[in-house]
Structures are given as structure tokens and as C-alpha cells.
């Protein structure tokens, strides 16, 4: 065609109008200077795997987001940079020291100063998260040049030295997480940070003074540091405070009684300090205080009624003080506390605590640190398959294979929430779960993922709907659960329910990645079909690993204890980590999946739709379909504990359990062996773990499993008690490993 012809100019004009009417898909084109900065950061971080595949034409503002890398732009500037690695943090290693340990940090050529110099070129950065990357060195004072920063997360690295005082000038900070590092010295004055809501400095070496904090804080985590002072009285005026965790420090003096009645307090952990004196019998508790732990201190007298025992929605723990009244079996004599308080006020090389206690703290830190570490590697198996040559537009709602499905039985709920260890207020993003951001999908996304719900991708079908295997656009494999509902579901009620489901994200759950709601065109306010997108775990179930002789060889006692701790942590999150809690779950060994690192993931927790319009709660208090107990919340909770006890029995004996009579028989035999010589106990445990367990570790596990199986639900322990005993069992096992020369087995338990 002649370029001078009228037709050519007409085509050119149409093309020009089309270009301006339909802009390129990228939401932003990054400023060239910031593009150069991103490449510089890639080099300074020594080319982590998530940065591979970049070139001069890479548009960083339109990269697919993943659980390991998020870059968000506004205009032509980066506003969020989230990078998550897989290097072990100090809290996951038995020895914590300075300089950092080899092979877990970046090389000797790494410069943290150069890294933050580069980061300051991102002048619009609001969210910065560099987690588990092996960063080491002192945090530069120039951090304050990131004056637009709202969220700073440098957790699970090897950063040492003092926290620079310049942090106090970062007025826009709403969330500051420096946990699981090697920080030492006094925390700078944080009162000037008038927007700060979340502070996590846990698992460091900070102290001795309690930090000066502002009134806007909602979540304070200072656990496992070296703080040796009283809790300042000013904290009793923190009206917004929901969560306070100062456990595993050396705090002294009386516990301020107003802490228990703060207007917003929900979670209070003062465990393993040197608190002394008595609590006033007139102490009152806020009605929303769901968890309180004052164990392992030097408290005397009688506990106030509101924390004297578990009651209603409150879990209260007060073991190993010198308290009178009930539970004296787990208390010291008053003379013990008086003696320890006298020692505590005297300077000593071990801070006034005896060596045994310090060893215990160090071991428990190694266990707990792995659970609360900000990031971890989720083993995702990427399947590359040649699908159909093209995906057409067929198979809309009318042809989706999703049978009529209405849940009449949903999990029980608990009204008062307990915030989990990494919870942040709504609106503040937390990247610590190591999962991709929760996503609301479209129907087209679901069709594309499942190849128009191809029957070849149908992996499960039953009373709980259909389950399809799918491929998301980032290449990862997911499971798509299809639920078809009755028409009488208000959009508002369903959205409230999906908000609850969106919180079901934890390292020991098969986590929810997103959802899609489809409605009739002629009834736009009535939902008919819901798709729930779940994480895919393709390494098989715990049952598979215990019955397959090849896989069973990988599950020695330390690995089994790590797995059971993971299951308990997942249940703990379901019961107390979200509001409302989820109870009445179908906890079976077949429903415990293991990822590539043998980390347990519960796949059977209740995901149910509301049974009617106008429900007060998105989850209605009905009994689970598998429950053989009554439908009360307490019994649903204790039914989960019973099922956990059954799983523990199977892990210990290696034998499948198919009936309640088998449970009773095994429980009785194990009870008898506890009173007999050690050799009788070894006859009952799985032969494939012989020689890999310490007797006391095994005995502790058997005792807690036996308690989980009590006939009367009210006699069964809480999930917090189970976690505590499993931690102790792992601690004893670690000591046995060390003294028996079985050091190669230690790593399995250290991860938890």
C-alpha cells in the first residue's frame, strides 16, 4: 500500500485512536533511576533465586507477584519491595553468636551499608520487607532516609549491634519487625513514632531496660530478649493494646494488675520471667482477654478469680510459681520463690537464673523460633503439562460440574479472638507467612486454571463439593474447591464469611489462597457458586509416610516430633489464632499432608458456608459431621484434642487405627508399659524408630496423648497444654541426642 494514500492515513488514525483508548497493560513504567536501583539491589543481595531472569526490558512494575517477591509501583516509583529468602535465622540455630554463622548469611563481600544506600534511592518506598535473606552487619543509621516508610520488616536475618536511634524519627512507621536477629543493647525511644501500631523485636538480645513505647501500639512482641527491669507503669495506659508478649526475659517486680483489664487486651504472655509478689484478689480481666500466661515466675499468694482457671473463652496458665489453691501439683514451695527473688536482685553472670533454667530457655527458643520465624520455604511442585491447543469460552456457570451443595453443619465459633504471633491490624500487610497475597479471582481465572473444569482435572467429589486441580497464572499448582449454594444467601453475609476464610493462612494449614463468587445476572445480590482456591501439597499424607516402608525410614523420632508439633501448632491457630475460632475439624492422619521439608499441613479444617441469611456470625455453631460428641463449642474443641491424641498414637506405634476400640486398647497397653521396665515400652513403639528416641521424650509424648484421649471431654487438655508438653518432649529429646552422640538427628526438631 502506498504510504501517501488516504487509506493509509485512515488506518494510521484508527491505530492511533486505538492505542490511546486502550493503554498498555502495565500499571506503571518505572523511573529509569529506580530501575537501575533494583538491578543494584539484585547484585548487593548476591542474586537470590527470586531475582533470576531479569533483563534490560523487564518491567518491574508488572512482575507476577509470588510468596517470595512482591514489587508494587505507584506512578513511576516503587512503593513496596518484599523479598523472602530461605536462609536459617539465629532463633532456628542452637548457637546464637556474633559474628553470624557461616553458610546461613550472605558472603564476606556483602555490605549492609551499601544495600541501604541503594534502598534510599527508592524515595516513595512505603513497605520494605527483607526476610530470611542472610543479611548481616549493624543496621545503618541512614535507615531514616526512607522517610516514607510505613512498614519495615527485617526479621529472620543476622543483623547485630544496637538498633539505631534514627529509627525514632521515622514518623510514618505503622509496623516495625526486627525479630529473629542478633540485635543487642537498649531499644531507642519509640514514643515519637505516633503512628506505630505493630512492634516485633522478639528473639534478639535486647535489654536490660524495657523500651519507651507510644500509646498507639496494638501489638507488642518483645519475647526472648535480655530485658531486666520492671514493666513501666505507663503501659497500663495503652488503651489500644491487644497483644503483649514479653515472655522469656528477666523482667522483675510485681505484675501491674491493670494489664489484665486494659480496654482492648486480648493476649497477655508474661511467661518465664522473674516477676514476684502477689496479685490483688480484686484484679479484674477484660472480657476479651482470651489468653493469659504467667507461668514460670516467682508469684505467691492466691490468683484472682478471673485468671485462676480456664473459664469460658479464656485460657489461663500459671504453672510453676509458688501459688496456693488448686493446681498445687504444678507449683513450687513458697520458700523456693523467696530464695529465687533474693538471688534475682544480686548481679550475677547468669542474670540470676540458674543454669538449668537458662538451658531450658535456650532449647525452647530453638523450638519456638522456627514456628514464629517470619518466613519459610513452602515446597511448591510446578507441573508443566501441555493442555489443549486453545481454551475457548465454553463452560460457563451453566456447565460447571458443581452439584447442589449447602452446608447445614458448620464449625463452632468462639466469640473472643486471640491474636496469633504474627497478627497485624487490618490494613497493615504482613508478609511473614511466606504465602502469596490473598486474591479475589474471577470466573475467567477459575476456567483458565482448570481448563474449563475439564473432568480430567477433577481430583475429588463428595458431600463437600468438587475439587479440581488447577494451574494459576504464575505457574503454581493449586486446588479449586467448587461449592454450589442455595439462592438465599445475602451478598453481605457471604462476604463476611469469605473475610473469615481469608484469614485461614498458616504454615501448618493447607492455606486458602483466594476465592471467587459467581452470581446470577438476574439476581445480582444472591450468590450461587463459590470457588475456594487452596494451596497444593503434593508430597503425600502422614499416613502414606508411615505405611510406605521407604518413606517411613525418613521418619525417625525427631522428625515425628517435629511433625506432631506442626499439627498442634496448626490446631492452635485454628482454635485461638483467628476470630472466630474454628472447631470441630476432621483431624485424621490421612488428612495431614507433608510438604517437601516434612512440615505438616492440616488439609481437613472446616471451610463451610453460612446456612442461612442474617446469621450473626459467618460461621454458625453447629457440630462437625464427624463429631461423636455434643455440639457445644467446648466439646467441639475437645473433640479436636481427642483426634490429635489418636494421631499421636499412630505416630508412636506406626499402626493404623480404624476404630475407637483400637484406640482404647492401645491406650490401655501404653498406660501399663509406663509403669513397667523400659524394655516393655520399646516393644510397643514403631520398630523403625528404635534407637532414635530418648525414653523421657517418648514417655512425655505418650502421657500427653493419653490425656488427649480421656473419655470425659472436660478432662482433656487445651491445645496450649498439648503444645507445651510437646515442646518439653522435644527439649528432652534434644538433650538425649546431644549426650548420645546422635547430633545428626537434632536438626529435625530444631526447625520447630
Image (cartoon, rainbow, N blue to C red):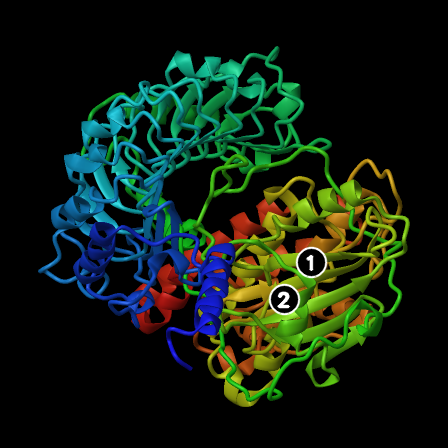
Is residue 523 toward the left or the right of residue 673 in the image?
Answer: right
Is residue 567 toward the left or the right of residue 463 in the image?
Answer: left
Q: Residue at x 76, y 75 (%)?
A: 395
Q: Secondary structure at mark 2?
A: helix
Q: From the viewer's side, name the closer residue of 740 and 503.
A: 503
Query: What separation in Å lies between label 2 and label 1 (alpha carbons)?
Result: 9 Å
Q: From the viewer's side, name the closer residue of 624 and 545.
A: 624
Tag nearer the camera, 2 or 1: 2
Report the disc number at residue 43: none
Tell me the quarter of the image containing the C terminus.
bottom left
Q: From the viewer's side, name the closer residue of 488 and 322.
A: 488
Is residue 539 toward the left or the right of residue 29 in the image?
Answer: right
Report the disc number at residue 445: 2
Report which residue position mark 1 lands on: 516
- Taking the view exactly as shown, the residue that stands out farthest to the left is 109
Q: Secondary structure at mark 1?
A: strand
Q: Position of residue 351 (x, y in %)?
A: 25, 32
* 248 relative to 48, above or below: above
Q: Quadrant of residue 564?
A: bottom right
Q: Position of residue 638 (x, y in %)?
A: 74, 49
Amino acid at each position: 500500500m502506498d504510504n501517501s494514500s488516504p487509506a493509509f492515513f485512515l488506518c494510521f488514525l484508527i491505530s492511533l485512536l486505538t492505542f490511546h483508548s486502550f493503554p498498555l497493560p502495565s500499571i506503571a513504567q518505572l523511573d529509569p533511576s529506580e530501575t537501575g536501583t533494583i538491578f543494584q539491589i539484585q547484585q548487593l543481595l548476591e542474586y537470590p533465586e527470586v531475582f533470576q531472569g531479569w533483563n534490560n526490558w523487564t518491567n518491574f512494575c508488572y512482575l507476577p507477584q509470588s510468596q517470595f517477591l512482591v514489587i508494587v509501583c505507584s506512578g513511576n516509583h516503587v512503593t513496596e519491595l518484599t523479598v523472602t529468602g530461605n536462609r536459617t535465622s539465629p532463633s532456628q540455630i542452637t548457637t546464637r553468636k556474633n559474628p553470624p554463622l557461616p553458610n546461613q548469611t550472605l558472603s564476606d563481600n556483602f555490605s549492609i551499608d551499601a544495600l541501604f544506600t541503594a534502598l534510599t534511592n527508592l524515595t516513595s518506598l512505603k513497605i520494605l520487607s527483607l526476610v530470611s535473606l542472610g543479611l548481616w552487619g549493624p543496621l545503618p543509621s541512614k535507615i531514616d532516609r526512607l522517610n516514607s516508610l510505613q512498614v519495615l520488616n527485617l526479621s529472620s536475618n543476622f543483623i547485630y549491634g544496637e538498633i539505631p536511634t534514627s529509627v525514632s524519627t521515622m514518623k510514618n512507621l505503622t509496623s516495625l519487625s526486627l525479630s529473629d536477629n542478633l540485635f543487642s543493647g537498649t531499644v531507642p525511644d519509640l514514643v515519637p513514632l505516633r503512628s506505630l501500631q505493630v512492634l516485633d523485636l522478639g528473639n534478639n538480645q535486647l535489654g536490660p531496660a524495657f523500651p519507651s513505647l507510644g500509646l498507639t501500639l496494638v501489638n507488642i512482641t518483645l519475647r526472648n530478649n535480655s530485658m531486666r527491669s520492671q514493666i513501666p507503669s505507663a503501659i497500663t495506659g495503652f488503651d489500644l493494646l491487644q497483644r503483649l508478649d514479653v515472655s522469656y526475659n528477666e523482667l522483675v517486680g510485681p505484675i501491674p494488675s491493670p494489664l489484665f483489664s486494659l480496654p482492648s487486651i486480648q493476649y497477655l504472655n508474661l511467661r518465664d520471667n522473674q516477676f514476684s509478689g502477689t496479685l490483688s484478689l480484686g484484679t479484674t480481666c477484660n472480657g476479651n482477654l482470651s489468653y493469659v500466661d504467667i507461668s514460670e515466675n516467682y508469684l505467691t499468694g492466691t490468683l484472682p478469680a478471673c485468671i485462676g482457671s480456664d473459664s469460658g473463652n479464656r485460657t489461663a496458665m500459671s504453672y510453676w510459681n509458688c501459688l496456693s489453691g488448686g493446681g498445687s501439683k504444678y507449683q513450687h514451695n513458697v520458700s523456693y520463690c523467696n530464695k529465687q527473688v533474693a538471688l534475682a536482685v544480686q548481679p550475677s553472670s547468669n542474670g540470676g537464673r540458674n543454669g538449668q533454667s537458662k538451658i531450658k530457655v535456650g532449647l525452647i527458643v530453638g523450638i519456638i523460633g522456627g514456628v514464629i520465624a517470619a518466613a519459610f520455604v513452602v515446597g511448591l511442585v510446578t507441573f508443566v503439562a501441555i493442555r489443549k491447543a486453545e481454551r475457548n469460552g465454553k463452560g460457563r456457570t451453566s456447565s460447571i460440574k458443581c452439584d447442589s451443595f449447602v452446608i447445614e453443619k458448620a464449625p463452632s465459633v468462639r466469640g473472643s479472638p486471640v491474636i496469633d504471633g504474627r497478627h497485624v491490624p487490618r490494613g497493615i500487610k504482613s508478609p511473614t507467612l511466606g504465602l502469596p497475597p490473598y486474591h479475589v479471582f474471577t470466573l475467567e481465572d477459575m476456567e483458565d486454571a482448570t481448563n474449563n473444569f475439564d473432568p480430567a482435572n477433577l481430583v475429588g467429589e463428595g458431600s463437600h463439593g468438587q475439587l479440581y486441580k488447577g494451574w494459576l497464572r504464575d505457574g503454581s499448582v493449586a486446588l479449586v474447591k467448587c461449592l454450589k449454594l442455595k439462592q438465599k444467601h445475602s451478598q453481605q453475609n457471604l462476604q463476611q464469611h469469605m473475610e473469615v476464610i481469608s484469614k485461614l493462612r498458616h504454615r501448618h494449614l493447607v492455606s486458602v489462597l483466594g476465592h471467587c463468587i459467581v452470581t446470577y445476572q438476574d439476581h445480582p445480590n444472591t450468590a450461587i457458586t463459590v470457588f475456594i482456591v487452596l494451596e497444593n501439597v503434593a508430597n503425600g499424607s502422614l499416613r502414606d509416610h508411615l505405611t510406605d516402608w521407604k518413606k517411613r525410614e525418613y521418619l525417625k523420632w525427631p522428625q515425628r516430633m517435629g511433625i506432631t508439633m506442626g499439627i498442634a501448632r496448626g490446631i492452635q491457630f485454628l482454635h485461638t489464632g483467628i476470630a472466630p475460632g474454628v472447631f470441630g475439624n476432621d483431624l485424621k492422619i490421612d488428612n495431614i499432608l507433608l510438604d517437601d521439608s516434612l512440615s505438616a499441613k492440616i488439609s481437613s479444617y472446616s471451610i463451610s458456608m453460612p446456612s442461612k441469611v442474617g446469621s450473626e456470625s459467618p460461621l454458625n455453631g453447629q457440630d462437625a459431621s464427624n463429631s461423636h460428641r455434643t455440639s457445644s463449642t467446648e466439646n467441639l474443641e475437645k473433640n479436636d484434642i481427642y483426634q490429635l491424641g489418636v494421631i499421636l498414637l499412630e505416630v508412636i506405634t506406626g499402626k493404623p487405627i480404624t476404630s475407637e476400640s483400637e484406640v482404647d486398647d492401645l491406650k490401655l497397653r501404653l498406660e501399663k508399659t509406663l509403669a513397667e521396665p523400659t524394655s516393655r515400652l520399646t516393644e510397643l513403639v514403631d520398630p523403625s524408630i528404635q534407637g532414635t528416641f530418648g525414653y523421657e521424650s517418648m514417655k512425655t509424648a505418650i502421657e500427653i496423648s493419653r490425656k488427649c484421649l480421656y473419655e470425659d471431654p472436660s478432662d482433656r487438655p487445651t491445645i496450649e497444654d498439648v503444645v507445651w508438653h510437646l515442646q518439653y518432649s522435644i527439649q528432652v529429646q534434644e538433650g538425649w541426642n546431644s549426650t548420645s552422640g546422635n547430633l545428626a538427628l537434632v536438626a529435625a526438631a530444631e526447625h520447630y
